[in-house]
DNA sequence: TATTGTTATACTCTATAACTATA
DNA sequence: TATAGTTATAGAGTATAACAATA
C-alpha cells in the first residue's frame, strides 16, 4: 500500500465498484504508480525509448519490424520511436547484410554511453519501487506475471 | 506464459538484457498483453474512459479534480476525458450543491445502460486474461500489487 | 505475392500555463 | 490566497492506409 510519487494507490474514501474486482485494473494501477517514479528517475528517455535502447543493445542488428513485434507495437510506431532515437544520435540504421529491405539497428557510441547511464537510473528506480517487497515476494510476482 | 492477443510475452529468441531483471518491466509487459485483449473485448470505450465511467457510477457527484486524483491524472486531462464522455451522452456535469465552482459528475440514463453493458464485457475480458491463474494465485497477485 | 521500411494522417492520452469564477 | 473548472497548446504513443524497394 505504498504511495509512489504522490499517487495514492487505493484511496479509502472512494468506491471502486467493479474496478476493484479486476486484476487487469490492479496491474494498471501498479503500473501508473511505477510510471510516475520512472519519470522522476530516468532523465531524457520515456519508457518505450529506453526499452528500445536496451533491446537494440542486447540484440544488435535487429530490424525494425522484429523490434516492434517484441515491444508489441506495429511498424509505423517503431518507425517513430527509432526516428526519435536516431535524432538523439543514440541509434543508427545500418544496412542489413542479409536483407537489403531491412535496417540493422545499432547503438552509436553515444547510445552505448547513454545506455550505461540510463541502466543505472532505471535499476535504482526499479529497486526503489519494489522496496516494499521481499526477494521471495518479487520472485512470486514475476512468476505470476508471466501467466498473462 | 500465455499468448494474449497475438502478443508474445517473452519470446525466446530475443535477449532482454536489463529489462528482464526489472519487475516494473514485467508489469508493463503483462499490461500490454491485457490491453490488447481489452481493445477486442470492450466496444467503444478506452480503458481511461471506462475507468471514469465506473468511478462516476460508484461515486455519484464526485468532482473532476477528485476524479483526476483517483485516476492519477491532472485537471486538464480529466477535463478532456469528461468532455468525451459528455459528447457520448454518458456523463452529465451537474452543478454542485456544496461548491459553485465544482461539477457534480453523474451518469445519464444512457450512461447507466452503457455501464451495464461495458461491465459485462470487461468482466468477461478480465476472466479470460486471468484464465491461467488459480483463484489462490490471483489472490496472491492482487496482494503483491498493492505494495507498489 | 509477401515483407520491410517509409510517409501521410489521425486519434488518444497526457501535461503546462494562463485565465475565470468561486471559496 | 487558494481551488475548481476551463481553454489553448504541445508532445508522445499509437494506429490505419498506401507506396517503393526488395525478397
Image: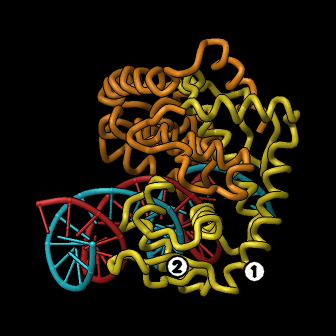
Chain colours: A orange, B yellow, C cyan, D red
Query: Quick check: B84 above or below A134?
Result: below
Residue A65, position as x, y percentages in the image? 61, 47
Question: Residue visible at 29% across and 29% down?
Answer: A110
- Percent position (x, y) of residue B19? 55, 27
Q: Are marks 1 and 2 on the same chain?
A: yes
* Residue B53 falls in image quadrant: bottom right
Residue furthest top as drawn: A135
**In the picture provided, is B101 more to the left or to the right than A96?**
left
- Of residue C9 and residue C7, the one placed in the foreground of this image is C9
Q: Is residue A68 left or right of residue A41?
A: right
Which residue is under mark 1?
B113
Q: Chain of mark 1?
A: B
Give the image quarter of residue B112. bottom right
- State the separation of the CA atoms marked 1 and 2: 17 Å
State the quadrant of the N terminus of chain B: top right
Q: Residue at x 45, y 49 (%)?
A: A81
Q: Is A45 or A81 nearer to us in this picture? A: A45
Residue at x 70%, y 54% (from the top left corner) = B36
Q: Nearer the viewer, residue A96 or B144?
A: B144
Q: Which residue is mark 2?
A: B84
Where is residue A10? Give x, y as percent: 56, 45
Query: How many circles with numbers are drawn on the protein?
Result: 2
Q: Earlier in the sequence, mark 1 or mark 2?
A: 2
Amino acid at each position: 500500500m505504498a504511495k509512489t510519487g504522490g499517487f495514492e494507490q487505493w484511496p479509502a474514501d472512494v468506491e471502486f465498484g467493479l474496478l476493484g474486482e479486476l486484476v487487469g485494473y490492479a496491474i494498471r494501477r501498479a503500473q501508473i504508480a511505477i510510471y510516475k517514479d520512472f519519470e522522476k528517475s530516468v532523465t531524457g528517455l520515456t519508457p518505450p525509448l529506453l526499452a528500445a535502447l536496451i533491446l537494440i543493445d542486447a540484440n544488435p542488428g535487429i530490424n525494425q519490424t522484429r523490434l516492434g513485434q517484441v515491444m508489441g507495437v506495429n511498424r509505423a510506431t517503431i518507425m517513430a520511436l527509432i526516428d526519435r532515437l536516431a535524432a538523439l544520435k543514440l541509434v543508427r540504421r545500418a544496412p542489413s547484410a542479409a536483407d537489403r529491405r531491412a535496417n540493422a539497428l545499432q547503438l552509436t557510441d553515444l547510445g552505448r554511453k547513454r545506455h550505461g547511464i540510463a541502466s543505472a537510473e532505471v535499476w535504482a528506480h526499479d529497486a526503489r519501487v519494489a522496496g516494499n517487497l521481499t526477494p521471495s515476494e518479487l520472485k512470486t510476482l514475476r512468476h505470476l506475471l508471466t501467466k498473462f
